[in-house]
């Protein structure tokens, strides 16, 4: 899967790098980059709400641990969904089995019809 498939931000033309976002929250960015991120935040309600929520986190040093934990849980959830989907799928050569069953059914039906006409 590509990185774009994990982008849940609607209408995002420009993505904010997660490291830059964490640096912004921890006030470790130069003024120019800070202004650039603030412009991106102002233009996107989804990102703006996310920033507001992240600002309420008391221990900013644990943000990266939270992000890593969320990414791991998302990966595990997607992996479980993928395994369930693969279990539901018929075997690769299911059409062969269906053909064999169909031919056997026709043979049995033919035998019964011929037997009925001979008696």
Image (spheres, grey):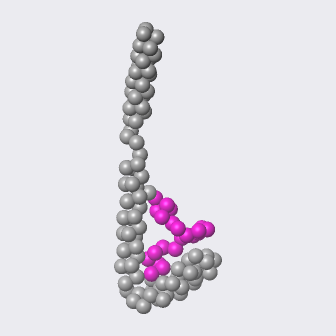
Seen from the viewer's position, the closer of residues 106 and 43 is 106
Q: Nearer the viewer, residue 77 or 21?
A: 77
Q: Is residue 42 above or below residue 101?
A: below
Give 69 or 114, whichever is nearer the viewer: 114
Quadrant of res 92: top left
- Give x and y (percent) for residue 3: 46, 62
Q: Residue at x 37, y 86 (%)?
A: 61
Q: Is residue 3 left or right of residue 80?
A: right
Nearest the viewer among 24 and 70 is: 70
For residue 84: magenta? no
Pinpoint residue 46: horizontal percent, then vertical percent: 58, 76
Q: In percent of the image, x 54 and y 85: which residue is there?
A: 52
Q: Residue furthest front?
A: 119
Q: Residue furthest toward the bottom?
A: 58
Vertical relation: 7 (above or below) 49:
above
- Number of labels in the image equals 0
Does residue 96 appear left or right of residue 29 in this picture? left
Quadrant housing the C terminus: top left
Whether residue 55 appears in this view of the structure is yes
Q: Is residue 7 magenta?
A: yes
Tell me: residue 2, above or below residue 114.
Answer: below
- As drawn, is 59 to the left or to the right of 16? left
Please name the residue shown 40% across and 28% down the image.
101
Tell me where residue 7 appears, x and y as whole percent.
51, 66
Q: Where residue 83 sits in the image (x, y, percent)?
A: 37, 54
The residues colored magenta run: 2-22
Q: Is residue 41 above or below residue 105?
A: below
Residue 37 seen in the current view:
no
- Return the residue found at the far top: 118
Q: Quadrant of the N terminus?
A: bottom left
């Amino acid at each position: 899967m590509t990185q774009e498939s994990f982008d849940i931000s609607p209408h995002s033309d420009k993505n904010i790098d997660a490291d830059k976002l964490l640096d912004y929250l921890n006030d470790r960015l130069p003024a120019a980059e800070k202004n650039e991120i603030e412009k991106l935040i102002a233009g996107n309600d989804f990102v703006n709400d996310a920033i507001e929520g992240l600002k309420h986190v008391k221990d900013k040093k644990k943000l990266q641990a939270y992000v890593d934990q969320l990414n791991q849980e998302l990966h595990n959830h997607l992996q479980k969904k993928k395994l369930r989907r693969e279990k539901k799928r018929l075997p690769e050569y299911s059409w062969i089995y269906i053909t064999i069953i169909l031919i056997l059914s026709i043979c049995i039906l033919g035998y019964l019809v011929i037997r009925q006409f001979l008696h």
